Image: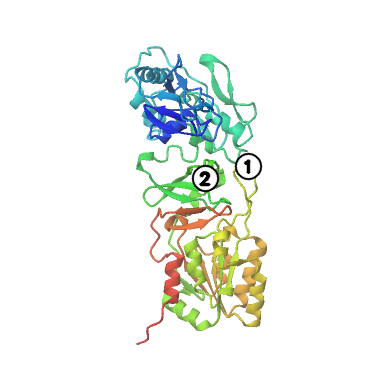
Amino acid sequence: MPTIKINDVALSVTPGTLVLDACRRVGIDIPHYCYHPALTPVATCRMCLVEIKGQPKLATSCTTTVPLAPKDHPEAVVMEVFTNTPAVADARAGVMEFLLINHPLDCPICDQAGECKLQDYSYLYGSGDSRMAEVKRRYRYEDLGAKIVIDKNRCIHCTRCVRFTREISGGGELIVAQRGAHLEVTTYIGKSLDQNPFAGNVVDLCPVGALTNRDFRFRKRVWYLKSVPSISRHSALGSPIWIDHEGNEIHRFRPRPLEGKETTHFISDEERNAYSSYNRTGRAPAAMLKGAGASSESIREALQAAGSLAVIGQGTFGCDAAQRLGELASSADLRYGSGGKTFAVVLPKYQTSADGILNRRGFMDRGFRFGALEELLGKVQKGEVKAVVLLHDAAFTSAKENELLGQILKVAAFSLAMEVEPSDLGRMATAWLPITNLAEESDFIVNHDGDLRRYQKALQPPKGVRTVPAWVKELSAVPVHA
């Protein structure tokens, strides 16, 4: 591999590596606006300029690549890069002054404040003074639909959003129109972002707050939020996300890109907007036995007295939950899997599976058999299985599977459902226990690609609501008789 020097630090890299990425490998953060690892580099913002020995002008590190080493001298230094020279500092200050000429001073009301690259880079690389005495440019208002709000006066024309709609989502709704001082990001006549199922990603891509989410707009200052790494259950692959929460309430989901995983940069609007379903409202559900409130001890005694026990685990829960649930079964062959939700494949590159049961593989690794519920129904009807414990989420159960599960619960001598909130199916069970949702627990999954993805607890569950492992421990306890 060719060797380059960055501020006199030697580094061996693959030919074709972007200088910007090479700098990151040695711990040097190159400021940039237009560059994004999942989009085509275009070098429009000019913020990532570096000095390269032997070149008369500064070069954009987001488009300059490392060349091949000479065949007769493979160990030679093929490029010397400098990121801290006076020329580079002067160029960055000039770019910042140019970008701020027409940018409005509305940071106090901007949703991007606190995570704005324009603020950060202005502080790090700007001059601190403005020579702009003229009236700032103003754009007319434009409606992008029910999802996204655009403020063109804040736009610095990095074109990330435009490239996203062309290269990733494919709708091409956003374009660059006009030229020079009248340049603007806009839409084709009659188009909006409402039909784009991945439209929310343009908000994450925008570095300056020109595009904001109508759902999150003016709701919360980001510096009050705490970010916890998690995954999306509304994704076939368990997309890694950030849960941003404050006051035991989730305020938004954001994509959490993983190193070397280009497909983790974006999430669908369905995943993004699912955050509200994890915020509990009203009184927390309580344990039930035969339609009335009951103690966990009474449910445990009824379960243990029922006889041979089978478990049904829906593959949208974590692996730790699956492991503990499986331990309740009377034998290893009485572990059954469930879940019938599918997702339409809109972007094949980012959705390699239509199966909405994201941890199916994790459950199968722990002995759960999917597609065998009719076998279980037969065993229950014959009396070979007396009790059934069901781990369930109605949102991920198909109508056909829901009917089959209902028959099993009706025929079983004793049935116990564990759910976050009671469903029609859960109410059919003899007993019911409230469990934590994804944001209230820590666990991990193994997705369809075999990737292990962990998620961490963000919220405190209500009193009386426990994780699946905690309930299993309670149900498995040996009763103490006086």
Image quadrant where residue 49 sits? top left
Q: Amino acid at mark 2?
A: Arg
Above or below: residue 287 compared with residue 115? below
Question: Circle 2 sits on which residue?
Answer: 272
Distance, label 1 to label 2, CA atoms, is 16 Å
All told, the count of numbered labels is: 2
Query: Eyeballing the image, is 56 above or below 396?
Result: above
Q: Nearer the viewer, residue 97 or 101?
A: 97
- Label 1 Cα crowd, 10 Å radius (few <14 / some 14-19 / many 20+): some
Q: Residue at x 45, y 15 (%)?
A: 57
Type of residue at label 1? Leu
458 relative to 427, above or below = above
Q: Residue at x 62, y 83 (%)?
A: 383
User: Which of pointers 1 and 2 lies earlier in the amino acid sequence?
Assistant: 2
Farthest-out residue, left = 128
Q: Splitting the image into 4 quarters, where does residue 91 fall?
A: top left
Residue 155 in the image: above or below residue 171: above
Residue position for label 1: 347
Query: Which residue is at the far bottom?
Result: 482
* Few, some or many residues within 10 Å of mark 2 (<14, 14–19, 20+): many
Q: Nearer the viewer, residue 321 or 196?
A: 321
- Secondary structure beneath label 2: helix
User: What's the image's color scheme?
Assistant: rainbow
> Residue 154 appears at what percent x and percent y?
46, 25
Could you say where residue 175 lies in the image, as x and y percent from the top left? 59, 25
- The image shows residue 344 at horizontal and vertical percentages of 65, 48
